[in-house]
């Protein structure tokens, strides 16, 4: 069994939901253990706990004490490893802390460290979902580079944007990519011909621009599993299998991956009463929003809604689907997990972060 440090998996009970989201990203795991002073265990907090809390309309600035499970499964030193395995399998638990009589955390037993590699591999979701990359736009916000190159080929370090995007999917087992193309499509096709990747690329040609969703109507009609659809200027650092699993478990027809973003107004805002007089001033108020990142998961039947060879946007598709009584869900992620490269200011940030 591998023993690893667990400092990144502990979080203080007085922190906020937003801070917990950052800590989850840093830990690269789906669970944190909440402690008080001297590593005394208070509770457990999973990414699912946070998602449900956000989707219930609660604030990201609330304390994690409102969210965490205050009665997590624990064990004591001298535990029997086979007993721990059975508990994890029965209760579908990914980690169990080892505590002393004062509930100080001594160790954390992680699923992937106590099961053999074969069992661990079988327990993980390994995707083979098709991925659509919307790569046909002109990228006017990244001019003058896009006067020469299509936006997906703008480099970040030693690779173009589109390779960074595709790699996020291939590490999870996705190996078939549909690239919808229009602007400077010959250059993009030549790049992949020269690259000769070990995954499949199918080009979907838009004869004329069809909007942010119109080209999806040109996809093959025999797709039979949920598909990822992503813009070609957004990189999402999440476990795509978690989002895919969420989409299916929730019974969604469309799932939007949305970043929990905080905006601060750098002024005092005036609140008026019913007489039109000043009620009070909010000094530099903060507001939380869920921002669409340009990454979606769609059931294949949704493609039948899209008219052929007409300008049609993703917002049109969502409205139509909702009007038909189908389910559109949201998968919240931390804003730090979203890298938007659609304009130069954000591009410079992406260069620093990748």
Image (spheres, rainbow, N blue to C red):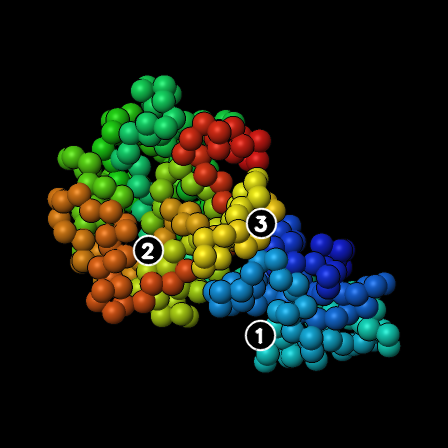
Residue 317 x %, y %: 24, 54
**Closer-to-camera residue (166/23):** 23
Of tags 2 and 3, which is closer to the observer? 3
The residue that label 1 is drawn on is 92
- Seen in the picture, residue 353 relative to 307 is either above or below; the reply is above
Residue 290 x %, y %: 46, 53
The earlier-in-sequence mark between 3 and 1 is 1
- Seen in the picture, residue 5 relative to 94 is either above or below; the reply is above
In what element is the residue under mark 3? strand
Q: Judge whether residue 248 can be spotted in this image.
A: yes
- Residue drawn where x is 57% and y is 39% of the image: 266
Assess disc 2: are there few (<14), some (14-19) or many (≥20) residues with their C-alpha within 10 Å of its C-alpha. Answer: some
- Residue drawn where x is 29% and y is 61% of the image: 299
Of tags 3 and 1, which is closer to the observer? 3
- Residue drawn where x is 49% and y is 45% of the image: 338
The residue that label 3 is drawn on is 281
Residue 262 horizontal side relative to residue 75, left or right: left
Quarter-of-image position of residue 73: bottom right
The residue that label 2 is drawn on is 227
**CA gap, disc 2 and disc 3:** 47 Å
Residue 19 horizontal side relative to residue 99, left or right: left
The earlier-in-sequence mark between 2 and 1 is 1
In what element is the residue under mark 2? strand
């Amino acid at each position: 069994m591998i023993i690893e440090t667990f400092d990144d998996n502990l979080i203080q009970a007085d922190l906020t939901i937003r801070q917990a989201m950052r800590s989850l990203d840093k830990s690269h795991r789906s669970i944190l253990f909440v402690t008080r002073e001297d590593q005394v265990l208070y509770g457990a907090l999973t990414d699912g706990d946070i998602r449900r809390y956000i989707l219930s309309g609660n604030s990201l600035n609330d304390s994690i004490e409102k969210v965490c499970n205050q009665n997590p499964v624990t064990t004591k030193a001298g535990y029997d490893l086979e007993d721990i395995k059975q508990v994890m399998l029965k209760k579908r638990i990914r980690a169990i802390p080892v505590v002393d009589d004062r509930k100080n955390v001594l160790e954390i037993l992680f699923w992937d460290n106590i099961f053999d590699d074969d069992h661990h591999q079988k327990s993980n979701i390994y995707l083979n979902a098709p991925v659509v990359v919307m790569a046909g736009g002109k990228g006017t916000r990244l001019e003058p580079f896009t006067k020469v190159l299509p936006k997906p080929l703008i480099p970040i370090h030693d690779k173009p944007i589109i390779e960074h995007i595709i790699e996020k999917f291939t590490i999870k087992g996705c190996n078939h990519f549909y690239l919808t193309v229009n602007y400077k499509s010959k250059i993009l096709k030549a790049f992949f011909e020269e690259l000769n990747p070990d995954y499949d690329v199918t080009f979907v040609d838009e004869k004329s621009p069809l909007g942010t969703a119109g080209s999806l109507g040109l996809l093959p009609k025999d797709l039979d599993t949920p598909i990822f659809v992503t813009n070609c200027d957004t990189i999402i650092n999440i476990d795509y299998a978690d989002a895919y699993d969420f989409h299916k478990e929730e019974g969604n027809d469309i799932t939007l991956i949305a970043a929990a973003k905080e905006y601060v107004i750098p002024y005092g805002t005036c609140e008026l009463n019913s007489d039109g007089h000043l009620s009070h001033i909010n000094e530099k108020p903060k507001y939380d929003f869920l921002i669409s990142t340009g990454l979606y998961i769609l059931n294949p039947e949704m493609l039948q809604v899209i008219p052929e060879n007409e300008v049609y946007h993703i917002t049109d598709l969502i409205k139509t689907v909702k009007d038909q009584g189908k389910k559109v869900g949201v998968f919240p992620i931390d804003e730090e997990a979203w890298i938007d490269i659609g304009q130069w200011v954000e591009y410079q940030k992406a260069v620093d972060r990748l």
